[in-house]
Image (cartoon, rainbow, N blue to C red):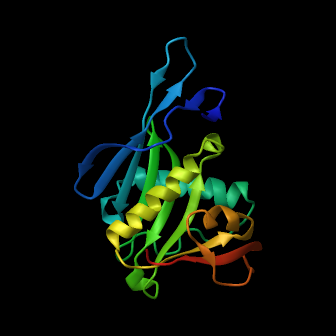
C-alpha cells in the first residue's frame, strides 16, 4: 500500500485496461479515498495523446503543472515552453484522477531527436508524491515509446540524483554529469529491447 496523502491510499498499483480510443489509450489504477467511512474508488486514467489531440484544458493543465514544479518549486527561471510541445509527432502522457492532473511527461519524436525517442518534462504533482505514481508513469512511458516508435532507443536527461531511479527501468548513463539550468543532470539511454 502506497500513501498519497492522509486522504488517499493506493490499493492496486497495477494498471487495469479500461478502454481504447483512437489516439488515446486509457488505463486506470484504483485509488481508495478515506475521507468518509464509505471508501470510494477513484481511478487514475492514463492518456497518451498526440499534440494535435490535446484540448485547450489539457495544454493549460500540463503547462501550469510544469511551471509549478520546474519553475516555482525548483526555483529555476527558464523557458519551459520550448517550441517542441506541438511539433512533429510529439506525444504527451497524462495521469489524471477526478479531473486533476497528477503526473505528466513528454515524448519527443525520434525523427527530430537524432533517431532516439526523448522522454522529458517528467513530473509528479506534489500531492501525489510518495505514492508510487512516478513508477507507473515510467512504466507507461516505456510502453508508449515501444508502441509508438518500435525499435528505437529511449533517451532522457535526468537530474543526477535520480540516476538510480531511472536505472531501474534499464537506463544507463551515457554522459558525464553536466549542469542544465544550474541543476546537475546526466544523459541516460535505454537500449532497444
The residue lying furthest to the top in this view is 37
Image x and y of residue 37, in percent = 54, 11
Q: Is residue 93 left or right of residue 126?
A: left
Image x and y of residue 114, in percent = 46, 88
Residue drawn at 22 percent across, 56 percent down: 22
Residue drawn at 56 percent across, 52 percent down: 135
Image x and y of residue 40, in percent = 46, 21
Q: Is residue 171 left or right of residue 58?
A: right
Image x and y of residue 117, in percent = 45, 76
Q: Is residue 111 left or right of residue 158?
A: left
Residue drawn at 59 percent across, 45 percent down: 132
Instruction: Give above or below for 110 relative to 74.
Output: below
Q: Indicate the quadrant where residue 3 lies.
A: top right
The residue lying furthest to the bottom in this view is 114
Q: How many marks?
A: 0
Q: Indicate the quadrant where residue 108 lies.
A: bottom left
The quadrant of the picture occupied by the N terminus is top right
Amino acid at each position: 500500500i502506497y500513501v498519497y496523502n492522509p486522504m488517499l491510499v493506493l490499493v492496486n498499483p497495477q494498471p487495469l485496461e479500461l478502454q481504447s480510443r483512437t489516439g488515446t489509450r486509457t488505463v486506470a489504477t484504483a485509488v481508495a479515498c478515506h475521507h468518509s467511512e464509505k471508501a470510494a474508488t477513484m481511478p487514475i486514467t492514463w492518456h497518451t495523446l498526440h499534440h494535435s489531440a490535446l484540448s485547450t484544458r489539457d495544454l493549460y493543465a500540463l503547462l501550469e503543472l510544469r511551471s509549478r514544479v520546474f519553475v516555482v518549486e525548483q526555483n529555476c527561471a527558464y523557458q519551459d515552453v520550448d517550441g517542441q510541445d506541438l511539433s512533429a509527432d510529439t506525444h504527451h502522457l497524462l495521469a489524471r484522477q477526478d479531473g486533476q492532473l497528477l503526473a505528466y511527461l513528454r515524448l519527443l519524436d525520434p525523427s527530430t531527436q537524432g533517431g532516439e525517442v526523448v522522454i522529458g518534462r517528467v513530473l509528479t504533482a506534489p500531492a501525489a508524491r510518495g505514492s508510487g505514481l512516478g513508477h507507473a508513469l515510467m512504466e507507461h512511458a516505456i510502453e508508449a515509446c515501444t508502441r509508438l516508435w518500435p525499435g528505437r532507443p529511449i533517451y532522457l536527461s535526468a537530474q543526477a540524483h535520480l540516476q538510480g531511479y531511472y536505472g531501474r527501468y534499464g537506463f544507463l548513463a551515457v554522459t558525464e554529469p553536466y549542469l542544465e539550468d544550474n541543476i546537475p543532470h546526466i544523459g541516460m539511454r535505454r537500449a532497444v529491447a
